[in-house]
Image (cartoon, grey):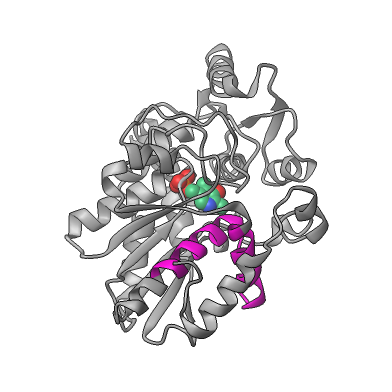
Amino acid sequence: MAADHPHAWAARAIRLLRDEARQHGPTPLHTLRLPGVPGIDLHLKDESAHPTGTLKHRLVRALFTYTLAAGAIQDSTPVLVATGGPVAVAAAHFARLLDLPCTAVVPPRTPAAALDRITAAGGDWQYAERPPAALQEETRALAEATGGHFLDHFTDAAPAVASCGDPTLADELFAQLRTTPHPLPAWLVTGAGTGATSATLGRHLHRHGHPTRLAVADPENSAYYPSWTTGYSGYATGMPSRIPGIGRPRVEPGFLPTAVDLVVPVPDPASVAALHWLHTAGFPAGPSTGTAFWAACHLAARMREKGVRGSIALVMGDGADPYRATYLDPAWLTARDLEPGPHRTTLDRFAATGEWAGA
Ligand SMILES: *Cc1c(COP(=O)(O)O)cnc(C)c1O
């Protein structure tokens, strides 16, 4: 009987994950038209609309499907993750759906609000005992000692998305763009954390032979920009990014440099200026969307200079809500030298005239 088959539980679990995706449907695509760049549409793929509020929801669902299909998670296997961020919240959400225990091993200085989000999604957390650089190893060892499975998003998110068989962010985005004036954008713009999202977009472009180019918007302290420009994958900055979710001190295994046409370095205060600009314009996005929006505006200004019409689609990785007391608070920004300063003027001028200061 099917119910006694050793794969029956995993098959049912995979079906639950698929139903979850179908139930919520595609995330919205918002369109922004600016007086300064007539004939150039900017689209925001709003990943804040996922039940756990970030694009990690999609990555973690693919990770679960991929891991279940490989037989590495079975009925009542404890699931462990090595982060206190949105991957932990999404992992807790899906573990609850599948009735599995989930523990996040979190760095000692994880904010209380982040821990609360993990608990609210049904997960447990515990503080890491070893230094932050050893977080993944510590979690892997803990999983081995407890018969659990370490869901390693830095190593496995990109292959999971590529092979889980579910519609990707790129599939959804291009289906939505079909009904717009420019169904094949001139550019796609995203940030890179694990690199899975940029790899997914790049693979889609290659597979379909689209003329669209892919730009990665990279914050300060990230290894992606220097490594992409030099071709040296061992590049390490040793410094954490200040833009949540994107920019890494080393090149993560999921980042696919050959799929990327351009990496745009974005100063952190410019990311903040763009975040505030979007907020004022009615798009409550998070900081990584600010970074992507800054790069997208720069690319739109170049299109205008060349007299090119078309569209640019960018990934809105999360929303503004978790950042009200931080990136949206002027005092918090001042204490960290992150004030938007003249970058805000650059954006206001660009939006009104299409001109890019200093370009
Ligand atoms: C993770 C993340 C990204 C980057 O996505 P990757 O697929 O990991 O490169 C962008 N924005 C936010 C808010 C994220 O959490």
Is 14 on the left or on the right of 142, as rendered?
Answer: left
Q: Relative to the observer, which residue lies in front, 100 or 338? A: 338
Is residue 166 placed above or below 236 in the rendered structure? below
Q: Which residues are magenta?
A: 270-299
Residue 3 makes an appearance in the image: no
Quadrant of residue 230 within the rendered picture:
top left
User: How many marks can you see?
Assistant: 0
Q: Relative to the observer, which residue lies in front, 168 or 355? A: 355
Is the N terminus in the top left, top right, bottom left or bottom right quadrant? top left
Is the C terminus in the top left, top right, bottom left or bottom right quadrant? bottom left
Is 38 on the left or on the right of 109, as rendered?
Answer: left
Which residue is at 36% across, 62% downward? Answer: 188
Farthest residue toward the top? Answer: 145
Residue 276 within the segment the image draws in magenta = yes
Is 84 on the left or on the right of 60, as rendered?
Answer: right
> Where's residue 201, x and y in %?
33, 54
Is residue 42 placed above or below 60 in the rendered structure? below
Residue 280 within the segment the image draws in magenta = yes
> Where's residue 274, x and y in %?
59, 66
> Where's residue 208, x and y in %?
18, 60
